Amino acid sequence: MEPSRASVFSTEGIKTNEAALPHLMFAEGEELVGVRVLTYQSSRSINTILDALEEEAIQYLRGTSFGKIVEIAEKPGFSGRFARYLLSRQLKVEKKHEAWFRFAGKPIRFSIREFAIVTGLPCGEIPQNQKLKKKKNMKEKLYWPELFGNIEHMRVYKAVKMLRRKTVTDKDTRLKLACLAIVSSVLLSTNLKMKMLKEHAQLLGDIEEFLAFPWGRLAFDMLMDSIKKCDEVSLSKNTIALKGLALQLVIIEAVPSLTEVVQESCSSSESDSGEEDNDSIRIKTKKQTLSPAHGREVDKKVEAFVRCIIPMDPQHRFDESILLRSDEVSDSKVDNLLKLINVNHFFVKFMFTGGLTKLDVDRLRLKENVAVKRKQPLTNQPSSVSVDEAKIIALVESTIQLDITRIDGQLESIRKSVESESRFAELHKADVLAAVDSMLLSFKNDIIAIVSKATAFVISRNSRPPRDDANDEIINNVIESLSEYSTPPPSGQACPVMDILIRLVRSTVNKQAGCKTGRNCQFLDARFASMLARCYPKFKKAKSKKDYIFSKGIVGCLSTPTPQQNMPTRFYFPFNVDNRHWIGLCIYCPASKIYVLDCNVTARSDDALASELRTITDIFIHLLKFSGCITSIDGITLLVDRVEGVAQNTIPADAGLTAALLMQTHALFGADTCRCITPIVLTEEAQRDAVMIYEFKHVL
């Protein structure tokens, strides 16, 4: 059942609904899959450059603005599949220099501030004298010849070869070559054949000036431009390019648990140079990258720790005012996000709505293709081109005619050989089948003889009639009594067998899940729902719902947390639908939802079930407030959500036990595992529960 989106969450005067927060790029569950993301900036390139340097030079770079770039080589490499997963979960914002992503239900910001934190690069404004250097300072002595002499073009792999072969021995020159290679292949690379630019080399006249130059702003603008170009249609393509590594670094800082699982990969997502030197054999070791599968699992966890805005690195502080952009546009939805983040609002994924479906993307792609075709010129090609094509076709046919004739002869020979083998196999088919049948018949007779002897032996050993164990009789009585809950008692009356099952589930969950989950879950017996139903008419007539006084009996059902305990976040109890069918209910407070665990959805439609559960959705939050379990109920409305994928069983006698097992499985393992509770396992589970009820009858 799709929950209503009309509810409004309120946090200290800030109201948010689906119109006040950024929409998703793709609708929930409609994200595109199978798309690979390439990046030309490779962390493997950093290793290649550092391997060609002495330890003294590497330590020097660690102490400069390039220090965090050096550290990137020690972190998990770029994962193209995880980047695709992240890009398909963008939020649609108007900001030109910001991108927002939804992960684990929380928004994460990626801006030049976050870029500066994870890369450590200067990201201030580009100096005006550097912008005008190309035009006004043409007479300035070029520094390029001091590095490369008369060579007009220099690619990164050749410069690294010079460092590795020690063609250049001067320490300062080697350091400058390494810095230029990092800028060209890591920060500002736009293709596989990375070329060094003379404008960048000109800054190497003063190495301090080169390191202080705002390379970070240039690299961020290039990366942000590639992100903004990833619209819904472009993300549906098989391969897209992302010009930078910093986005993954920011997400790792925001969600530290992503690095708990890494995998070894030789993925082509990180593109190396298209040209390699052949003076030595390069051994490419496997690179550790983020695990996309682990990333998807973390994304599903509501409780995952996520920093919506990563904090400043205390060892690399900078003035954030220099990062402001004069051309940035305002976005009220982003402003609402920031306000909620500042007050530590608890985000859940269904707060972010909208987005395109796969069908919408197909329609957009079709419109773009039609528009492109309309722009193509309609003029016919000159007749001379057609004549040239005809001549080329005739020439090619005459050239390969001999080869075609030879191939046809070989194919005919193969065909005749296959026909001969087929006739031979057909002749011997009957003989082979007769031999196999004879062997199977002999094997069957041997098995029958062995089983007959074993059966006679067992009968002789057990000639005395068996006696039933006293415990067996008790257990059989317990199993038979389980059928009592198949016909629920009239409303308001107790259901002892169902209550015993709930107590057994409570004991099992507390024992298996440990103290943490045990404190977060509370299991209520069958009479709790009927008590709410009896209380509902008076509650509905009350003028002030907040001041309604509940009876001690219904308040006593809830366990009030002590100062040393946390309030339960999930409340489980069975619910009797029309005195004919049992379902399990889970009230999950953080998400303001009632999850319905139902093994027979045909017994009640979604709308009818939501109407019948009004006695719970309208009153339960006020009961929590009255009993002291929560302090505020402003803006909280419980939504009914029927858990999908539950195995269906229309036998009424199985509904009670199934509901108890579904609540137990949901509490321990989550909604997905509830699919394992099928009619096939009920017999075994009933026997197990009967044994446990008998063994712990004094406790239960």
Image (cartoon, rainbow, N blue to C red):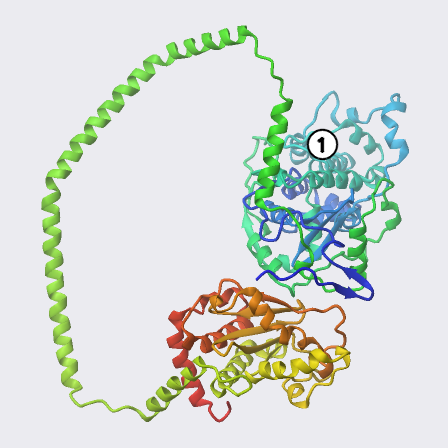
Check the image and report above or below for 166 versus 20: above
Q: In which quarter of the image is residue 296?
A: bottom right
Residue 330 image offset from top left, x and y in percent = 83, 46
Residue 187 in view (yes/no)? no
Q: Name the residue under label 1.
A: 168
Name the kind of residue labelled 1 in the image: Val
Query: Horizontally, is 199 left or right of 516 in the view?
Result: right
Task: Count neighbours of disc 1 (C-alpha within 10 A) and say few if under 14, some if 14 to 19, many if 20 or more.
Answer: some
| Front-lying residue, 458 or 120 | 458
Q: Indicate whether 404 appears above or below 261.
A: above
Seen at 48% across and 93% down, the residue is 698
Residue 100 visible here:
yes
Q: Where is residue 129 in the image (x, y as percent from the top left)?
A: 90, 32
Q: Position of residue 414 (x, y in %)?
A: 23, 27
Is residue 116 toward the left or the right of residue 272 in the image?
right
Residue at 87 percent across and 27 percent down: it is 133
Q: Can you give x and y, in whole percent of width and height, for residue 492 in the image? A: 56, 86
SS class of the residue under badge 1?
loop
**How many numbered tags mark residues here?**
1
Of residues 366 and 691, which is closer to you in this image? Answer: 366
Q: In the rendered view, does 202 fall on the left or right side of 628?
A: right
Towards the viewer: 92 or 526: 526
Q: In which quarter of the image is residue 461?
A: bottom left
